[in-house]
Image (cartoon, helix red, strand yellow):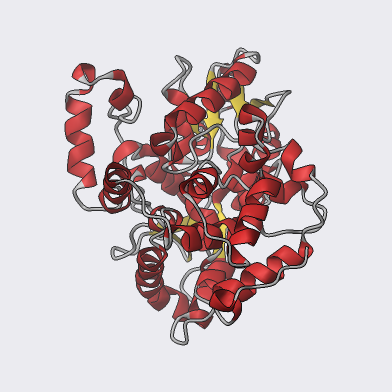
């Protein structure tokens, strides 16, 4: 797809990157067939191909409108289109550029600006944990719309205290420690059982995705730099072999640090190294399997019955990691099944999307749960806190991180 950049964007990094991405697009429409919002809304401008044309028009000098902004907002950034694109179009990077350019020219209504500000500042704030605790205390009194965002309080269990020669860094996340603290401690216990020590750098915080995808790209990049600074002493000394992510949304962002900060003269090389070291927890499973099999309680594994697995978009499309969790869980003896229909589609969580676009988000959630419940599972598993919370808000079946199930069937050390 040929693009004639307007003088405004001709010599900017964003313009040049967008032009490079657009050159790969052949307008084939494969992406439209697998876009969740296009399937629901049936509007070409609510599919990747239509949004690409909107971004192209802006780059060529057309004045964006509020409608342009809304069509870009309705994108989940699930990146399913990247998995089906035969030309390798990096749509995720392109839509980030498009949103940035459009928001610079189209002012949002006051109420919308306030909600977006509250999300990007509040969710990564130190005040989030006490606010979530208060919400859990009065959860029964909350209206359903708020109750859906406040999971029931759960005990994290004990953090392992043994030291091991093998060490990995782990990002605890901004909302996960408050919303589902057992995910992090279960991760540490499973790795400990395999002779790997989990290290948490105290100064590491939000991965940057919240702000970055709410178009505060400078704020998101600042959080990325802070995390790099927190992790770098461990990396520089060669004391850790990986940076492990148990939230696939964080994982896809940290793996992109090298791209986001590639023009930063101070952080570019460090960011690239951090991205290279970053692994989703599921990527460690192949090397953990032999030890885990020795320590599992087979009768407990069998007693778990059928469990359904929802692979998050950030894992299967963003990180292009497909089939690993269910394959390795099956190797451990679990009866893991994936929905026969639409397992590749987004559940509607998509970070803050379910707050900003609830009507679409809940349609996608209910559609996803309908396919999963056909399996009649005793539990639904996933690999991202956003998906877990969103799916649980519409299901009586427990929704959990897969590592929590592995943790439960291990023989105590």
- Who's the residue at 64% across and 73% down the image? 5
Residue 243 makes an appearance in the image: no
Residue 327 image position (x, y, % from top left): 71, 37
Q: From the image, which quarter does the C terminus lie in?
A: top left
In the depicted view, which residue is nearer to us: 82 or 201?
82
Left/right placement of residue 242 relative to residue 145 reads right
- Who's the residue at 27% across and 29% down the image? 153
Left/right placement of residue 48 relative to residue 146 reads right
Q: How many marks?
A: 0
Left/right placement of residue 68 relative to residue 335 reads left
Q: Determine whether 376 is above or below 325 in the image.
A: above
Residue 318 image position (x, y, % from top left): 62, 51
Q: Determine whether 405 is above or below 164 in the image.
A: above
Q: Determine whether 139 is above or below 117 in the image.
A: above
Residue 298 image position (x, y, % from top left): 60, 26
Residue 401 image position (x, y, % from top left): 49, 35
Left/right placement of residue 167 relative to residue 175 reads right
Q: Residue furthest bottom?
A: 265
- Who's the residue at 37% across and 52% down the image? 172
- Who's the residue at 68% across and 35% down the image? 344
Q: Quadrant of residue 32?
A: top right
In the depicted view, which residue is nearer to us: 40 or 399?
40
Residue 249 makes an appearance in the image: yes
Q: From the image, which quarter does the N terminus lie in?
A: bottom right
In the depicted view, which residue is nearer to us: 45 or 7?
7
In the depicted view, which residue is nearer to us: 69 or 289?
69
């Amino acid at each position: 797809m040929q693009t004639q950049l307007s003088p405004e964007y001709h010599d900017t990094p964003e313009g040049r990157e967008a032009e490079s991405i657009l050159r790969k697009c052949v307008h084939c429409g494969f992406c439209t067939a697998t876009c969740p919002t296009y399937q629901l809304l049936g509007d070409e401008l609510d599919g990747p191909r239509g949004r690409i044309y909107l971004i192209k028009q802006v780059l060529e000098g057309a004045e964006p409108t509020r409608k342009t902004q809304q069509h870009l907002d309705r994108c989940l950034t699930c990146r399913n289109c990247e998995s089906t694109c035969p030309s390798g179009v990096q749509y995720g990077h392109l839509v980030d550029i498009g949103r940035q350019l459009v928001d610079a020219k189209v002012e949002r209504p006051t109420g919308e600006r306030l909600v977006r500000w509250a999300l990007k500042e509040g969710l990564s704030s130190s005040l989030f944990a006490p606010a979530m605790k208060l919400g859990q205390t009065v959860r029964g009194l909350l209206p359903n719309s708020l109750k859906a965002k406040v999971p029931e309080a759960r005990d994290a269990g004990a953090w392992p205290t043994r030291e091991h020669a093998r060490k990995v860094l782990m990002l605890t996340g901004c909302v996960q420690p408050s919303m589902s603290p057992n995910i992090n401690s279960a991760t540490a216990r499973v790795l400990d059982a395999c002779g790997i020590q989990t290290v948490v750098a105290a100064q590491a915080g939000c991965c940057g995705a919240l702000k970055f995808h709410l178009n505060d790209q400078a704020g998101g990049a600042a959080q990325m730099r802070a995390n790099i600074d927190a992790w770098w002493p461990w990396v520089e000394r060669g004391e850790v072999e990986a940076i492990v992510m148990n939230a696939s949304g964080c994982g896809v962002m940290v793996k992109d640090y090298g791209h986001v900060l590639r023009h930063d003269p101070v952080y570019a090389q460090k960011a690239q190294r951090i991205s290279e070291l970053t692994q989703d927890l599921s990527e460690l499973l192949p090397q953990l399997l032999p030890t885990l099999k020795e320590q599992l309680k087979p009768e407990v594994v069998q007693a778990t019955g059928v469990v359904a697995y929802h692979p998050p978009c950030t894992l299967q499309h963003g990180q292009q990691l497909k089939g690993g969790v269910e394959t390795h869980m099956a190797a451990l003896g679990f009866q893991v099944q994936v929905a026969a229909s639409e397992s590749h589609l987004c559940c509607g969580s998509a970070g803050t999307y379910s707050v900003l676009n609830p009507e679409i988000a809940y349609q996608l959630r209910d559609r996803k749960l309908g396919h999963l419940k056909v399996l009649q599972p005793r539990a639904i598993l996933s690999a991202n806190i956003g998906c877990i919370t969103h799916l649980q808000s519409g299901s009586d079946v427990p929704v959990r991180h897969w590592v929590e199930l592995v943790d439960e069937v291990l023989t105590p050390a």
